[in-house]
């Protein structure tokens, strides 16, 4: 077994400008923006452009049961959204197949050898559960489905 990719964490920051219906919190509209609140108007879909203009003007028109009703909105400013992603360990099995070690048990498609999430080879499945009385299919049942 050889390591192809070590696990690593990726973090990135996004910004959204939020407009909430007056008297509500977390109920309204948000648009991707820069840290200073600038929105790329030209990059928006046409329907989003019209809603942005309405939000900036402080009142949004909604069609409810065929009738147009206006509601006031408040500019809540910019919210910072932090996103995280864990890149998983990828190993090369002795048979040459790549195995992503992102679960408790990670089988190799090439030779059916099993690895744990740290890339360590596990004992053959026939030996699983000897101490606990479990069958190896019980261990995998929760993993794969």
Image (tube, rainbow, N blue to C red):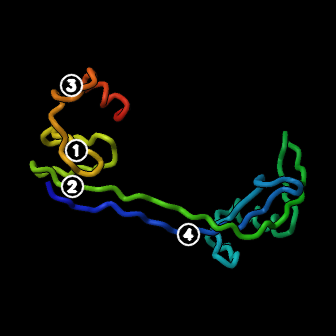
Q: Earlier in the sequence, mark 4 or mark 3?
A: 4
Spot occupied by residue 32 in the image (x, y as percentages of width and height): 64, 67
In which quarter of the view is residue 54 placed?
A: bottom right
Q: Earlier in the sequence, mark 2 or mark 4?
A: 4
Q: Earlier in the sequence, mark 1 or mark 4?
A: 4
Q: What element carries label 1?
A: strand
Horizontal side of residue 92 vs 73, given as left or right: left
Spatial CA distance of label 2 from label 4 is: 29 Å
Above or below, comparing residue 128 to residue 17 in the picture: above
Q: Do the numbered discs 3 and 2 sit on residues whose CB atoms are within 8 Å?
A: no
In which quarter of the view is residue 104 placed?
A: top left
Circle 1 residue: 115
Q: Is mark 2 on a helix, strand or loop?
A: strand
Q: Identify the mark at residue 91; answer none if there is no mark.
A: 2
Spatial CA distance of label 3 from label 1 is: 18 Å
Q: What element carries label 3?
A: loop
């Amino acid at each position: 077994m050889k390591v192809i990719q070590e696990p690593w964490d990726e973090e990135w920051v996004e910004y959204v400008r939020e407009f909430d219906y007056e008297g509500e919190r977390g109920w309204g509209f948000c648009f991707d923006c820069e840290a200073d609140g600038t929105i790329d108007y030209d990059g928006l879909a046409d329907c989003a452009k019209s809603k942005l203009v309405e939000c900036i003007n402080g009142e949004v028109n909604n069609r409810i049961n065929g009738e147009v009703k206006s509601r006031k909105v408040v500019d809540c400013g910019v919210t910072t959204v932090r996103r995280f992603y864990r890149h998983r360990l990828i190993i090369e099995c002795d048979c040459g197949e790549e195995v992503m070690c992102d679960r408790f048990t990670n089988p190799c498609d090439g030779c059916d050898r099993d690895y744990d999430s740290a890339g360590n080879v596990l004992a053959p499945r026939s030996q699983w559960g000897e101490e606990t009385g479990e069958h190896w299919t019980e261990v995998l049942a929760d993993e794969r489905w």
